[in-house]
Each structure stands twice: as structure tokens, then as C-alpha cells.
């Protein structure tokens, strides 16, 4: 479908629906029907009530597919009724654009501006984040999403939170969303041998505390690019540390896993494997100590659901 000379962008929109199969299927079909785009993966989270789609394609086609999917979400998802374990602020909560092949970050940023304008024109407040951010205090997703959906009415009254696209008008049904160009991110959840959400939250807080020290210690440097929260997943009957690794080179997944194992031990518990939400690039699993298969085994990526290299590593899916 694609060649080594094509300019390609990856898009990983997160939708606030993980329980209604018809809605999830409708969003998927809107992506599949878009020319010059390949839908690679759908990760459905029942407890999180959230579904992550991963697709790759030519830049303008990716923008079209994302817009089409967001339009479906605007029609079918009602945030007034939404409940789930994962923080959220909109029917499409966040829509990142990631340069994948023969595409620069600046090109991805420009594409986010064009897409954001289209989305804003259909009545959805859009906030640019990461590399696309227009304000330093709005470049992190967690800052934009603080207070979640319920905080939107008050946030929109604050001039500092005027949307980058769309009006400062509360869209009760949709909420609001973040959009931007960024580097590869790994959504990586580590299973704890406990059901105690208080322990999970304490471990996540410890990770954030170490990161915010911003000193030259090994863990502070390692955690600079790790975002962590603790939650309980009823489906898996365990608490988890849910992380986003926003720089896979400076915070290698295996090193992050090892460090969190030690912190869990300090809190009187241990880890029992992990899961990936969405896909992972091949180089994120490459490590000086482990082969790819050994890395998968060490991380316990098969512990709660099957991990298939052919289906979960981006390069295997895209170019096989």
C-alpha cells in the first residue's frame, strides 16, 4: 500500500467510548473508508471506557480520516453520560499526529493547524499541545485536561484558556479536545500484585515526585519523560501504574519497567507483567541486554492479553 519513498504520518486518536461496539465500529469504518490511510490497530478499554485507534497514511489523507472519525464521535458519543477510569475531557479526547516516514515535525505541526481549524469550524473547542502548542503552559496534555470534562465550563470563562480553534462555548455533548504533533509515545501499563488503588496512586505519585526533583540522579533523569497515574482495573482484577512514555529514547521502556518494579517493592508489593495500549515502534523494544523476544518476555506483555509481534509492532504491521 505504501512505499519507502512515501511521506507518512501516524495518527493515534483516543475516543471516550470503550463499551458500545456500534459506536467503535462506526468510528473504525470512517477511518477505513478514507483513501491512502491504513488502520493498523484498535485498542478497546472497557474499564477506561476509551478506545485508541492507530492509523498511518499520507498526510492530507490522515487529516481527512481524523476529521471523519471526529465527526462520527460528535454524532454518537455524549460526554454528559460518560464514566470511566481514564481521565477525559472530550468525545475525542486527544488526537496526536506523529511524523513516521519522510515527514518532518514542522510538516506535522502545519497539518495539525489545518486539521484544528476544520474541527473548530464544527463547534468543537480545540487546544494545540506538544510540538503544536502556542503557549508554554498549554503544551502538556495533563495541564489542558486538568479537571476533566466537568471543569470545562469554568475553564472556558478564563481568557488564558481560549481555544486555539473553535469558540469559548461549552459543547456539552462533545466537550473539548487536544490536538498536536508529537514524537512517538508509548502507553504502557504495569500490573501490580495488589487490588489496592491507594498503593498504585502512591507509587505513581512517587514517580512524579522523583521526576519533579529535576536533578542529576538516575531516576530523575529516567522519569523526565514518564507520565504516571495509578488506577484499578476491574477487568484484570488488579491495580496498575498507567504510564505514558513520551520519549522512548531517553526513557527506554525496559529501564522504566525495572525502576517501577523497585519502587513497587519499596511499597510492599510487586509487579506482574504489563500491557501496551496501542502499538509500539520496533526500536522501543531494542535493548543492549535483550533480544526482541526476550524483551517481550521480560516485560510480561503477554500477562493479561496476547502480544503478537506481527500485530503489535508498527513496522511489522505496516510493511509486512
Image (cartoon, grey):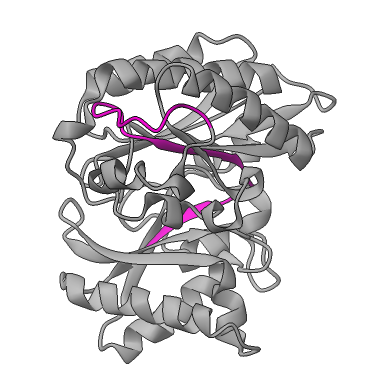
Q: Is residue 74 visible?
A: yes
Q: Is residue 155 left or right of residue 31?
A: left
Q: Is residue 42 left or right of residue 280?
A: left
Q: Nearer the viewer, residue 85 or 81?
A: 81
Q: Nearer the viewer, residue 313 or 260?
A: 260
Of the 4 image quadrants, the one containing the C terminus is top right
Q: Position of residue 188 (x, y in %)?
A: 44, 57
Of the 4 image quadrants, the one containing the N terminus is top right
Magenta region includes residue 180 = yes
Instruction: Give the total of numbered labels.
Output: 0
273 relative to 70, above or below? below
Q: Nearer the viewer, residue 134 or 238?
A: 134
Q: Residue at x 23, y 66 (%)?
A: 239
Q: Position of residue 300 (x, y in %)?
A: 41, 63
Q: Residue at x 64, y 39 (%)?
A: 98
Q: Residue at x 48, y 63 (%)?
A: 297
Q: Is residue 9 left or right of residue 222?
A: right
Q: Position of residue 176 (x, y in %)?
A: 37, 35
Q: Is residue 183 visible?
A: no
Q: Nearer the viewer, residue 30 or 255?
A: 30
Q: Residue at x 23, y 32 (%)?
A: 79
To which quarter of the image does residue 251 belong? bottom right
Q: Is residue 132 left or right of residue 41?
A: right
Residue projecting furthest to the right: 5
Q: Position of residue 76 (x, y in %)?
A: 26, 18
Magenta region includes residue 121 = no
Q: What residue span does the magenta drawing correspond to?
A: 165-189
Q: Main secondary structure of the magenta part?
A: loop
Amino acid at each position: 500500500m505504501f512505499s519507502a519513498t512515501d511521506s507518512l504520518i501516524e495518527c493515534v486518536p483516543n475516543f471516550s467510548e470503550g463499551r458500545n461496539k456500534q459506536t467503535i465500529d462506526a468510528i473504525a469504518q470512517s477511518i477505513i473508508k478514507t483513501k491512502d490511510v491504513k488502520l493498523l490497530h484498535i485498542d478497546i478499554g472497557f474499564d477506561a471506557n476509551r478506545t485508541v485507534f492507530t492509523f498511518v497514511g499520507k498526510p492530507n489523507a490522515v487529516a481527512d480520516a481524523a476529521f471523519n472519525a471526529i465527526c462520527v464521535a460528535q454524532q454518537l458519543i455524549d460526554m454528559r453520560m460518560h464514566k470511566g477510569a481514564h481521565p477525559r475531557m472530550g468525545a475525542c479526547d486527544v488526537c496526536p499526529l506523529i511524523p513516521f516516514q519522510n515527514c518532518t515535525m514542522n510538516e506535522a505541526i502545519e497539518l495539525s493547524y489545518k486539521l484544528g481549524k476544520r474541527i473548530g469550524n464544527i463547534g468543537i473547542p480545540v487546544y494545540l499541545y506538544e510540538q503544536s502548542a502556542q503557549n508554554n503552559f498549554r503544551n502538556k496534555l495533563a495541564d489542558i485536561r486538568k479537571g476533566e470534562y466537568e471543569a470545562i465550563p469554568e475553564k472556558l470563562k478564563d481568557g488564558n484558556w481560549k481555544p486555539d480553534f473553535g469558540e469559548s462555548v461549552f459543547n456539552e455533548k462533545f466537550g473539548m479536545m487536544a490536538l498536536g504533533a508529537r514524537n512517538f509515545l508509548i502507553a504502557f501499563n504495569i500490573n501490580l500484585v495488589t487490588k489496592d488503588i491507594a498503593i498504585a496512586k502512591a507509587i505513581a505519585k512517587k514517580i512524579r515526585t522523583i521526576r519533579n526533583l529535576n536533578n542529576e540522579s538516575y531516576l530523575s533523569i529516567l522519569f523526565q519523560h514518564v507520565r504516571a497515574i495509578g488506577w484499578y482495573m476491574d477487568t484484570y482484577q488488579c491495580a496498575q501504574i498507567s504510564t505514558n512514555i513520551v520519549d522512548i529514547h531517553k526513557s527506554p521502556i525496559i529501564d522504566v519497567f525495572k525502576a517501577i518494579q523497585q519502587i513497587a517493592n519499596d511499597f510492599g508489593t510487586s509487579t506482574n507483567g504489563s500491557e501496551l495500549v496501542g502499538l509500539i515502534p520496533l526500536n522501543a523494544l531494542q535493548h543492549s541486554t535483550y533480544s526482541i523476544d526476550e524483551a517481550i518476555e521480560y516485560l510480561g506483555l503477554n500477562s493479561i492479553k496476547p502480544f503478537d509481534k506481527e500485530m503489535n509492532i508498527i513496522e511489522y504491521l505496516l510493511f509486512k
